[in-house]
Image (cartoon, rainbow, N blue to C red):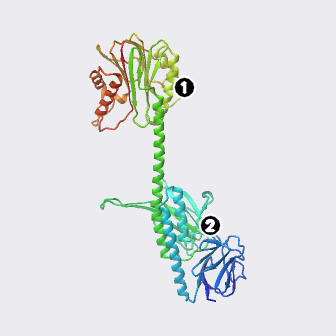
């Protein structure tokens, strides 16, 4: 029978123990051939029995199990270099050694085996990190790999928020178990110091020397071995003369309740390598999550834009005595301008154009609500001033702070009489053979004053006259030089296309505005309604 030994690492330290009996008993009981200390070592934990030319390890119904090469076993034939662990995390670890080797050779063998194990664990971890996309999965992969490399019992990751404050993200234990964050007691002193300085802290035993006085909070939790390394993100830029980006995004913390063996240089190097790659993987997962969230929001905005356009009436409207066309180009995905058409009981054609204060989703929501309010009030009111008065009261009573609407509403009869009320909106332009007239009669903007009063005016249209209603996104559109488009350019465009149909006229105005603002960003919703009276 060849000689066999165990390279033992437990709470009592590290030692070489020969297997000197045919049945070698291992456990916490004093009468065992190998007495081990550890929170997960049973009194009679396991035995190693010599059978012919082999050695077999058997678990003796221990509470926390026996593991060979990280696999749970009840009976297993041992080979040279097998790693034996009693318990899941707080037990003892041994390496089974065969043949006649000197203690120095045994130590070299176990060291080499340990280094190879660390390298294998590191390579597995790095390979897994390359496929990680979800942040929580990447954090779990990092912790599992770090625990395998270092032999720690548990670990956690803290990441820095926008204010550079560490936030707890995930905790894991041996066996790839997720630990509850609320029950993970730990002192913040070491992680915060490592994050602040950027220097790794690796302590084999906090009870040695003066360390216990410095880290009393950590020692009070029963922790003796601590390993904490910064997660440093290093990115290299394309240009050689440009400085590379090097910033700390968090810390990787590992600890054990048992006294650890001396941490080798290979362990330190493996942890530093893992931490560097982990920082890149975590940042990539963050960016991937942000990209997916942005894509989801963009998709929702596209759907919202489609819904908003569906709420607007069809762009063109043709009647017995008029032709009209309208369109809205939002500054963002969705906008705060709206227009609407109303067929009134007396045969008149009603039309409105409004501009909600603000941009984006808040303005779009209020715009949709205003369309509903306007449609309900226009159907039950005889005159434009009455409609706008009721719309103002309905909006005011909803109490939407700092939100108001400019609104232009008019009704056109077959005989060419146009009755309108302008509530703080850009004055529409009546353009015909008699020149240009601005329609300004009305009242204040809608939604600010409960008792606001509104008046109306009636003008006579002649066949061929054009009425141009527009939002300030048209008249106040800015060129690349900061110049406003202005009403004069609207008039000039209309007068150059008097023979056009309303859709063509509308397109001419939008084309001219886009040509004027080329090179400058659109800073407001662009909405216009054009109407030609036919008589």
- Tell me which numbered mark, 1 or 2, is placed earlier along the sequence: 2
Q: Quadrant of residue 24?
A: bottom right
Label of residue 102 in the image: none
Q: Residue at x 57, y 69 (%)?
A: 152
Determine crowd level at label 1: few under 14, some 14-19, many 20+ residues with C-alpha closer than 10 A: few
Residue at disc 2, secondary structure: helix
**In the image, 497: left or right of 66?**
left
* Residue underneath mark 2: 220
How far apart are the alpha carbons under marks 1 and 2? 61 Å
The answer to whether mark 1 and mark 2 are in CB contact below 8 A is: no
Q: Residue at x 49, y 32 (%)?
A: 365
Which quadrant of the figure contains the N terminus?
bottom right
**In the image, 429: left or right of 375?**
left
Determine crowd level at label 2: few under 14, some 14-19, many 20+ residues with C-alpha closer than 10 A: few
Residue at disc 1, secondary structure: helix
Which quadrant of the figure contains the C terminus?
top left
* Residue underneath mark 1: 397
Looking at the image, how many numbered discs can be counted on the residues? 2
| Residue at the top extreme, as displayed | 415
Image vertical order of residue 448 relative to residue 254, above or below: above
**In the image, 514: left or right of 27?**
left
The residue mark sitting in front, 1 or 2, is: 1
Image coordinates of residue 458 in percent, x first then y, are 40, 12
Q: Residue at x 30, y 62 (%)?
A: 240
Image coordinates of residue 187 in percent, x first then y, are 57, 63
Image vertical order of residue 527 relative to residue 342, above or below: below
Q: Nearer the viewer, residue 268 or 22?
A: 22
Image coordinates of residue 355 in percent, x first then y, are 42, 28
Image vertical order of residue 138 relative to residue 392, above or below: below
Image vertical order of residue 343 relative to residue 72, above or below: above
Q: Is residue 163 visible?
A: no
């Amino acid at each position: 029978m060849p000689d066999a030994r165990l390279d033992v690492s437990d709470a009592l330290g590290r030692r070489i123990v020969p297997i000197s009996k045919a049945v070698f008993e291992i456990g916490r009981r004093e009468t065992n051939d190998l007495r081990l200390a550890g929170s997960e070592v049973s009194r009679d934990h396991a035995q190693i029995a010599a059978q012919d030319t082999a050695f077999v390890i058997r678990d003796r119904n221990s509470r926390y199990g026996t593991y060979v090469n990280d696999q749970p076993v009840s009976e297993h034939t041992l080979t040279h270099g097998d790693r034996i662990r009693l318990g899941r995390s707080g037990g003892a670890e041994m390496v089974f050694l065969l043949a006649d080797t000197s203690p120095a050779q045994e130590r070299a063998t176990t060291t080499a085996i340990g280094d190879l194990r660390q390298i294998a664990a590191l390579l597995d971890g790095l390979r897994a990190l390359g496929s990680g996309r979800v942040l929580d999965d990447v954090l779990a992969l990092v912790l599992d790999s770090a625990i395998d490399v270092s032999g720690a019992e548990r670990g956690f990751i803290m990441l820095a928020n926008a204010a550079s404050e560490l936030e707890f993200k995930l905790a894991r234990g041996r066996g790839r178990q997720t630990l509850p964050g609320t029950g993970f007691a730990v002192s913040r002193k070491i992680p915060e110091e490592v994050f602040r300085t950027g220097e790794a802290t690796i302590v084999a035993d906090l009870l040695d020397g003066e360390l216990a006085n410095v880290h009393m909070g950590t020692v009070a939790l029963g922790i003796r071995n601590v390993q904490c390394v910064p997660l440093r993100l290093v990115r290299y830029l394309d240009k050689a003369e440009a400085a590379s980006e090097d910033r700390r995004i968090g810390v990787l913390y590992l600890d054990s309740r048992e006294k650890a063996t001396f941490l080798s240089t290979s362990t330190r190097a493996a942890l530093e390598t893992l931490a560097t790659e982990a920082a890149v993987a975590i940042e990539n997962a963050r960016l991937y999550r942000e990209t997916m969230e942005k894509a989801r929001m963009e998709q929702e905005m596209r759907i919202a834009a489609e819904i908003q356009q569906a709420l607007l009436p069809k762009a063109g409207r043709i009647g017995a005595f008029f032709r009209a066309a309208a369109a809205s180009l939002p500054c963002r995905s969705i906008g705060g301008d709206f227009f609407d058409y109303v067929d009134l009981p007396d045969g008149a054609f009603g039309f409105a154009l409004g501009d909600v204060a603000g941009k984006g989703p808040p303005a779009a929501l209020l715009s949709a609500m205003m369309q509903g309010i306007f449609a309900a009030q226009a159907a039950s009111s005889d005159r434009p001033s009455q409609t706008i008065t009721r719309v103002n009261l309905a909006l005011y009573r909803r109490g939407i702070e700092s939100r108001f609407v400019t609104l232009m509403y008019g009704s056109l009869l077959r005989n060419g009489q146009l009755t309108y009320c302008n509530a703080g909106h850009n004055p529409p332009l009546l353009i015909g053979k008699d020149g240009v007239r601005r329609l300004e009669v009305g009242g204040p903007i809608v939604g600010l004053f409960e008792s606001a009063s509104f008046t109306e005016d009636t003008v006579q249209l002649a066949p061929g006259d054009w009425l141009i209603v527009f939002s300030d996104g048209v008249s106040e559109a800015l060129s690349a030089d900061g110049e406003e488009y202005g009403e004069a350019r609207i008039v000039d465009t209309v007068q150059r296309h008097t023979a056009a149909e309303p859709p063509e006229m509308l397109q001419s105005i939008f084309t001219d505005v886009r040509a004027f603002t080329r090179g400058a960003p659109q800073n407001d919703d662009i909405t216009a309604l054009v109407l030609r009276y036919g008589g």
